[in-house]
């Protein structure tokens, strides 16, 4: 069981992993907390946006769409490797998923197949959307993949989690396919390698403010 890190701790952790962070508007107070609790948190969930274009993807994830209000995640990782923070707190990203998967994440064990949708994932997971069409053909630039790795590692490092606490949306909710274009086992391997390295102390990191 883990209390969600503060918005300031997330920002500092991402910078410490060497990431360029873009703070979008009032991200640290933009959430869906009025719909239910956020926490305890147990893991990091990775998605693809099914959109193209960084600005469009960020705007969608911040504002949401008809029938699904934003924020749709905590951060959007664009193809250039920047992390755009769009929300902090409860976010509409995970939806209902499998309680057996949640128990495996908490225990940091191999995940069972997701075959139920009976548990509120928005309460328990950090969520990061990655700019990609999700058609299996849209490329994943190395800068973006490195940012996904570093982002997941930043959250895991803060909580003392291993790479087993990083899952894909498709591993949580039956019928989902995201993220498509790489395997989660491969990503967890990269996160595990990074967690065995010391943080870079913010070298090469930066921050930008957007309205």
Image (cartoon, grey):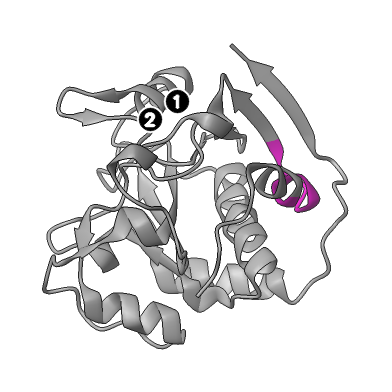
- Relative to 198, say whether 39 is above or below: above
Residue, x 28% and y 77% (percent of image)? 101
Q: Are marks 1 and 2 in contact (CB under 8 Å)?
A: yes
Q: Nearer the viewer, residue 58 or 140?
A: 58
Q: Which residues are magenta?
A: 13-20
Residue, x 47% and y 24% (percent of image)? 54
Residue position marked by numbered label 1 in the rendering: 58
Mark number displayed over residue 61: 2
- Relative to 30, say whether 10 is above or below: below
Which of the image's four quarters has the C terminus? top right
Task: Give x and y (percent) for residue 143.
Answer: 62, 43
Does the magenta-highlighted stretch encompass residue 35? Answer: no
Task: Give x and y (percent) for residue 111.
Answer: 32, 82
Q: What residue occupies the far top of the structure in this picture?
A: 211
Q: Quadrant of residue 210?
A: top right
Q: CA distance from mark 1 to mark 2?
A: 5 Å
Pointer 2 local density, CA inside 10 Å: few below 14, some 14–19, many at least 20: many
- Relative to 171, say whether 13 is above or below: above
Query: Which structural element holds mark 2?
Result: helix
């Amino acid at each position: 069981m883990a209390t969600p890190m503060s918005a300031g701790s997330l920002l500092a952790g991402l910078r410490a992993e060497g990431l360029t962070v873009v703070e979008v508007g009032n991200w640290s107070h933009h959430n869906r907390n009025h719909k239910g609790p956020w926490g305890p948190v147990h893991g990091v969930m990775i998605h693809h946006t099914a959109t193209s274009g960084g600005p469009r993807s960020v705007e969608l994830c911040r504002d949401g769409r008809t029938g699904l209000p934003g924020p749709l995640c905590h951060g959007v990782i664009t193809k250039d490797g920047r992390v755009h923070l769009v929300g902090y707190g409860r976010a509409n990203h995970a939806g209902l998923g499998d309680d057996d998967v949640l128990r495996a994440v908490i225990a940091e064990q191999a995940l069972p197949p997701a075959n139920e949708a009976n548990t509120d994932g928005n309460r328990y997971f950090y969520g990061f959307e990655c700019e990609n069409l999700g058609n299996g053909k849209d490329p994943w630039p190395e800068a973006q993949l490195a940012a996904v790795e570093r982002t997941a590692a930043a959250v895991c490092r803060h909580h003392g989690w291993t790479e087993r606490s990083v899952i894909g949306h498709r591993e949580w909710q039956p019928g989902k396919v995201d993220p498509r274009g790489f395997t989660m086992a491969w990503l967890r391997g990269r996160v595990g390698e990074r967690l065995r390295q010391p943080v870079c102390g913010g070298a090469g990191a930066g921050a930008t403010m957007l309205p």
